[in-house]
Image (cartoon, coloured by chain):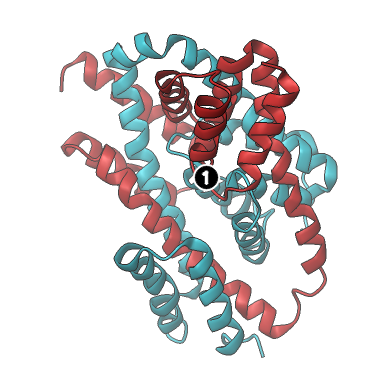
């Protein structure tokens, strides 16, 4: 498949969705049903690979591009993922300078508290999947305590958790 | 713009470090960046975070990348915005292709799976810590009713009635504009 077409199709899917996997139905319709360049199984593999690694869920688009057109397709997919992100800058410029208005400042503080609730809500399905036993619960509690009450770097907490996870599998905890 | 301007190289290193090591999607990465850029280093003010967070939700595409573009721009301008997005996503993109190739074998590896599950558990704790950090400055004698309404209300609207984040933030914005917080007058 032509990498330019891959880019345009994936960009379209990204531009009309507002979260990581919301573009999946459009990608499915274009790549599996209309152009027949991907099978259902390949699309599932792309989604699984995107979700298995670090980074945003929407990164599966890169895998879709790769499966559709090889390395140039992966580059096209990556460009389609990052292009819409820069649309935020004009919005930011529009509001910059107006944030000192008391009502706007108060509205922003309210959004901050709402963001706190949204993060809590997003942690629920993640916790449901990952907190499967006492070991995982201890790791989560330790992570919360370290990150809330110390200045330790986030990366060290993540690496320590990975090492403990691999170690626990090795010791068959 | 922030009072303290970090170098673009230092910023890019942070986006690369956290964007490519945090499992579980975009929200954990946003939580990690909020902690690192805001709480630990004091580069990003809570107001800048709130603006970037809310605008990234109304930007099409991947929210976390729009968040990186916005915070990079707020801290150091266009160049930082581009390098933040590239730093936070390019290594993950390469890894996604690599995982596509070797997905089945990686899935069968017990140690890799156990490490990923433990990282996800740590990320769950990190997200709760980040939510706590965002609400903590408002947890005062005068501020707690706002926390209860806005943070608790958001959780309730999302979990009990499945409202979208956009609808909830529009509601929070309206509440904030009508009910001025102490000191905003």
Does residue B90 appear in this view? yes
Q: Nearer the viewer, residue A26 or B105?
A: A26
Q: Check disc 1 and report the residue beneath it.
A: B32
Percent x, y of residue B58: 63, 58
Q: Residue at x 49, y 62 (%)?
A: B165
Which residue lies at the image location 54% right of the left edge and 39% below the top edge?
Answer: A26
Drawn colour of chain A? red
Where residue A60 sits in the image (x, y, percent)?
52, 29
Q: Residues within 10 Å of mark 1 (few under 14, many from 20)?
A: many
Chain B painted colour: cyan
SS state under label 1: helix
Q: Quadrant of residue A40?
A: top left
Q: Quadrant of the N terminus of chain A?
A: top right
Identify the residue shown where x is 38% and y is 77%.
Answer: B148
Give the chain of mark 1: B
Quick one: quadrant of the C terminus of chain A? top left
Q: Position of residue A164 (x, y in %)?
A: 30, 25
């Amino acid at each position: 498949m032509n990498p330019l077409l891959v880019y345009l199709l994936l960009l379209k899917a990204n531009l009309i969705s507002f979260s990581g996997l919301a573009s999946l139905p459009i990608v499915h319709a274009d790549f599996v049903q209309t152009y027949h360049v991907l099978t259902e199984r390949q699309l599932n593999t792309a989604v699984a690979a995107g979700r298995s690694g670090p980074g945003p869920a929407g990164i599966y688009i890169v895998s879709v591009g790769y499966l559709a057109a090889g390395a140039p397709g992966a580059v096209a997919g990556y460009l389609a993922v990052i292009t819409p992100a820069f649309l935020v800058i004009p919005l930011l410029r529009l509001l910059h300078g107006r944030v000192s208005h008391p009502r706007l400042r108060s509205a922003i503080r309210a959004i901050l508290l709402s963001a706190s609730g949204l993060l809590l809500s997003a942690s629920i399905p993640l916790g449901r999947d990952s907190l499967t036993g006492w070991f995982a619960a201890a790791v989560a509690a330790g992570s919360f305590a370290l990150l809330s009450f110390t200045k330790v770097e986030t990366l060290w907490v993540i690496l320590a958790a990975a090492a403990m996870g691999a170690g626990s599998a090795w010791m068959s905890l | 713009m922030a009072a303290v301007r970090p170098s673009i190289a230092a910023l890019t290193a942070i986006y690369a470090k956290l964007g490519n090591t945090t499992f579980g999607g975009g929200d954990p990465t946003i939580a990690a960046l909020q902690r690192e850029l805001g709480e630990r280093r004091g580069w990003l003010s809570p107001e800048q975070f709130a603006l970037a967070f809310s605008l990234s939700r109304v930007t099409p595409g991947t929210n976390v990348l729009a968040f990186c573009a916005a915070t990079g721009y707020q801290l150091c301008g266009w160049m930082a915005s581009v390098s933040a997005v590239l730093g936070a996503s390019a290594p993950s993109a390469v890894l996604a292709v690599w995982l596509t190739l070797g997905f089945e074998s990686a899935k069968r590896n017990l140690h890799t799976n156990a490490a990923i599950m433990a990282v996800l558990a740590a990320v769950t704790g990190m997200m709760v810590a980040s939510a706590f950090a965002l609400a903590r400055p408002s947890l005062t004698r005068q501020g707690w009713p706002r926390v209860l309404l806005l943070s608790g209300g958001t959780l309730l609207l999302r979990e009990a009635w499945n409202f979208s984040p956009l609808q909830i933030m529009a509601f929070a914005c309206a509440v904030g504009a009508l009910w001025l917080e102490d000191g905003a007058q």
